[in-house]
Image (cartoon, rainbow, N blue to C red):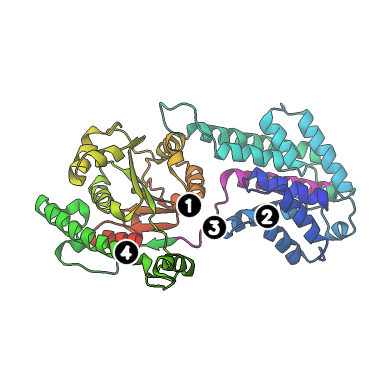
């Protein structure tokens, strides 16, 4: 039982689930208290110990099914209960070992073939580690930001799976009309199923659950005139009207926040401080003291796409965020097309409206390149990851269109683990999220909130919820 749990924990670690030694020991102790023949109970104990959040449940279920059903068809719960050897020494197992050994002898044993041979033998760990490294691979070459290197390696694995599939009938007894061929037929079927599993692992990466994702596609409030006009359709006159409307909203929200912070001394009476102050009044509590409530100002980091398709909306969102700096402990802004630039200093040196205009012309990035969200996330992780912490709300502003380049969504997962929450604002309506080169459906799994924000009504509603 201990060895079985250790092997399963190793497979979970191979697909990037965090499993500690203490959790493995707890799981082993818990399994002693149940009837392991009851698979539902057995699986529940494993999941309780190893899946730390609901986001891990789908990945855990996938690994459990692979390890206990698809790969280890020779594991019997009766053997587990009796703590017997888990690999039953039956004839098919012997034939399988002979077949796999012959395959290994006739293949050029590089890293991929060795991992596939181990997989066919019922040891998926090497193959799963190789796939995990492939999925999180960062290309060294930065001249062409693409996922061609990863796709090439996937193609190599796929070709070697097919090569092994073609060799299997030669060593498993492919003539099923001969006497005793039923065993060979079952062996051939088992090896084919395992190769199918290897192929599915290669082409279909399990994504974490994100049932708590808040998707906001419609605004609830209605304002006059400008409220429903998309930012991209505003005339110069309407832009000036929009700025005045934003200023009015900013004043209103600043007043609300100021009153909220000013009322922090009207909470619960602090007896100790009141008694200490009463000493100078001969013990009379003439000066009441209340428990101070800490200011709950959040930290904002904005990562903004400034490509032509998004900039008309992003400029108003940045304008609003920086107009509300008093409501947050810190606001830092970064812009990108295919690389990231820190533009916080522009807002420190200039008026908000002037800063937004200068960013479009003077920031240290290349504007006339293809938008690449994967390269952007990699650049941010390399150079700016230290600005994120558990007090940070990361706001990503962009349409998620990455010109069919590598999205590198696993980096967004790393960012999610460091921040309080991730909010993605997109100017594109929901009906376009699954079209063309859009990666919104890929990225939304790693966000806490996904909002359509393409007019003043939607922007007002978002800012009010963010501040209040």
Q: Which is more N-terminal, label 2 or label 4? A: 2
Badge 3 local density, few (<14 within 10 Å), some, or many (20+)? some
Q: From the image, tell me which residue sits under label 4.
A: 262
Q: How far is disc 4 from disc 2 in space, using C-alphas?
A: 45 Å
Horizontal and vertical percent position of residue 287 = 37, 69
Q: Position of residue 310 (x, y in %)?
A: 28, 47
Is residue 150 found left or right of 434 in the rendered image? right
Identify the secondary structure beneath mark 3.
loop
Give the residue at x 83% y 57%.
76
**Residue carrying label 1:** 446
Question: How far apart are the alpha carbons under marks 4 and 3?
Answer: 41 Å
Cα distance in 3D space between marks 3 and 2: 15 Å
The residue wearing badge 3 is 209
Q: Is residue 181 visible?
A: no
Between 330 and 232, the residue placed more toward the observer is: 330
Q: Earlier in the sequence, mark 2 or mark 1?
A: 2
Q: Is residue 387 above or below residue 435?
A: above
């Amino acid at each position: 039982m201990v060895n079985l749990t250790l092997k399963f924990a190793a497979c979970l670690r191979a697909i990037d689930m965090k499993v500690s030694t203490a959790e493995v020991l707890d799981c082993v102790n818990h399994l002693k208290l149940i009837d392991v023949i009851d698979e539902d109970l057995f699986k529940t104990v494993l999941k309780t110990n190893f899946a730390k959040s609901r986001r891990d449940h789908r990945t855990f279920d996938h690994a459990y099914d692979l390890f206990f059903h698809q790969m280890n068809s020779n594991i019997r719960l009766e053997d587990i209960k009796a703590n017997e050897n888990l690999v039953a020494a039956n004839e098919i197992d012997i034939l399988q070992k002979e077949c796999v050994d012959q395959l290994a002898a006739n293949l050029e044993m590089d890293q991929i073939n060795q991992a596939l041979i181990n997989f066919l033998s019922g040891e998926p760990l090497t193959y799963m580690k190789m796939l995990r490294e492939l999925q999180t691979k960062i290309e060294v070459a930065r001249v062409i930001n693409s996922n061609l290197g990863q796709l090439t390696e996937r193609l190599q694995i796929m070709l070697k799976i097919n090569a092994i599939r073609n060799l299997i009938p030669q060593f498993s007894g492919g003539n099923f009309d001969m006497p005793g061929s039923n065993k060979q037929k079952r062996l051939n079927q088992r090896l084919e199923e395992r190769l199918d599993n290897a192929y599915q692992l290669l082409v279909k990466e399990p994504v974490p659950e994100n049932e708590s994702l808040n998707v906001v596609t419609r605004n609830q409030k209605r304002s006059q005139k400008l409220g429903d006009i998309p930012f991209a359709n505003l005339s110069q006159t309407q832009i000036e009207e929009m700025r005045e409307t934003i200023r009015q909203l900013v004043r209103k929200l600043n007043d609300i926040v100021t009153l909220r912070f000013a009322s922090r001394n009207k909470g619960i009476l602090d007896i100790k401080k009141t008694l200490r102050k009463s000493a100078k009044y001969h013990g009379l509590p003439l000066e009441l003291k209340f428990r101070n409530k800490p200011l709950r100002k959040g930290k904002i980091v904005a990562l903004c796409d400034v490509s032509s398709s998004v900039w008309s909306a992003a400029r108003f969102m940045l304008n609003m965020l920086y107009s509300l700096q008093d409501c947050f402990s810190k606001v830092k802004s970064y812009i990108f097309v295919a690389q990231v630039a820190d533009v916080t200093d522009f807002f420190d040196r200039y008026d908000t409206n002037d800063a937004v205009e200068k960013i479009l012309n003077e920031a240290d990035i290349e504007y006339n390149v293809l938008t690449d969200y994967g390269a952007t996330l990699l650049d941010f992780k390399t150079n700016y990851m230290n600005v994120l912490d558990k007090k940070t709300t990361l706001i990503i502003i962009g349409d998620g269109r990455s010109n069919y380049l590598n999205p590198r969504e696993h980096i967004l997962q790393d960012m999610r683990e460091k921040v309080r929450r991730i909010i993605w604002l997109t100017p594109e309506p929901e009906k376009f999220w699954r079209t063309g080169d859009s990666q919104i459906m890929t990225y939304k799994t790693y966000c806490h909130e996904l909002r359509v924000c393409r007019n003043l009504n939607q922007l007002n509603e978002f800012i009010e919820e963010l501040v209040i």
